[in-house]
């Protein structure tokens, strides 16, 4: 009986050490990042700028021309085989 109690205490101690190590690891390297307001606004401005650039490129994108170029390159690949 005494041996069993010592084994259980040892197992509980080891589990506590493992949990403490996991807690400290999670505290040092969180999975989320907290930004200050200045960084948030800079990121928002950057995202909006990228969105505007993408939208302007999409309005200038010619689907018919892209399809012609794709067909041409496919024909060249087929001839190469």
Image (spheres, rainbow, N blue to C red):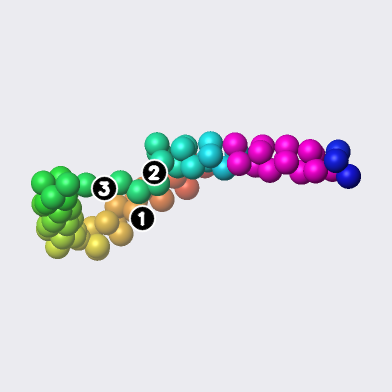
Q: Give, as a single range, the part of the protein colored magenta.
A: 4-17
Magenta region, main secondary structure: helix
Which of the two discs, 2 and 1, sits closer to the camera?
A: 2
Residue placed at 68% from the left, 43% from the top?
A: 12
Question: Distance from label 1 to label 3 (Cα)?
Answer: 48 Å
Which of the two discs, 1 and 3, sits closer to the camera?
A: 3
Give the residue pinned by disc 3.
Answer: 34
Seen in the picture, residue 65 relative to 21 is either above or below; the reply is below
Asked if residue 19 is among those painted magenta in the image, a careful observer would answer no
Of marks 2 and 1, which one's residue comes earlier in the chain? 2
Residue 71 circle label:
1
Residue 30 circle label:
2
**Direction from residue 28 to residue 43 in the image, left or right:** left
Residue placed at 11% from the left, 46% from the top?
A: 38
Seen in the picture, residue 79 relative to 53 is either above or below; the reply is above
Looking at the rendered structure, the secondary structure element under dot 1 is helix
Looking at the rendered structure, the secondary structure element under dot 2 is loop
Q: Nearer the viewer, residue 80 or 45?
A: 45
């Amino acid at each position: 009986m005494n041996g069993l109690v010592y084994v259980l205490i040892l197992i509980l101690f080891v589990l506590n050490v493992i949990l403490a190590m996991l807690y400290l690891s999670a505290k040092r390297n969180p999975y989320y990042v907290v930004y200050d307001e200045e960084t948030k606004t800079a990121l928002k401005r950057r995202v909006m700028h990228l969105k505007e650039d993408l939208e302007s490129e999409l309005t200038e994108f010619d689907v018919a021309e892209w399809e012609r170029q794709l067909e041409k390159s496919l024909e060249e690949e087929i001839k190469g085989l």
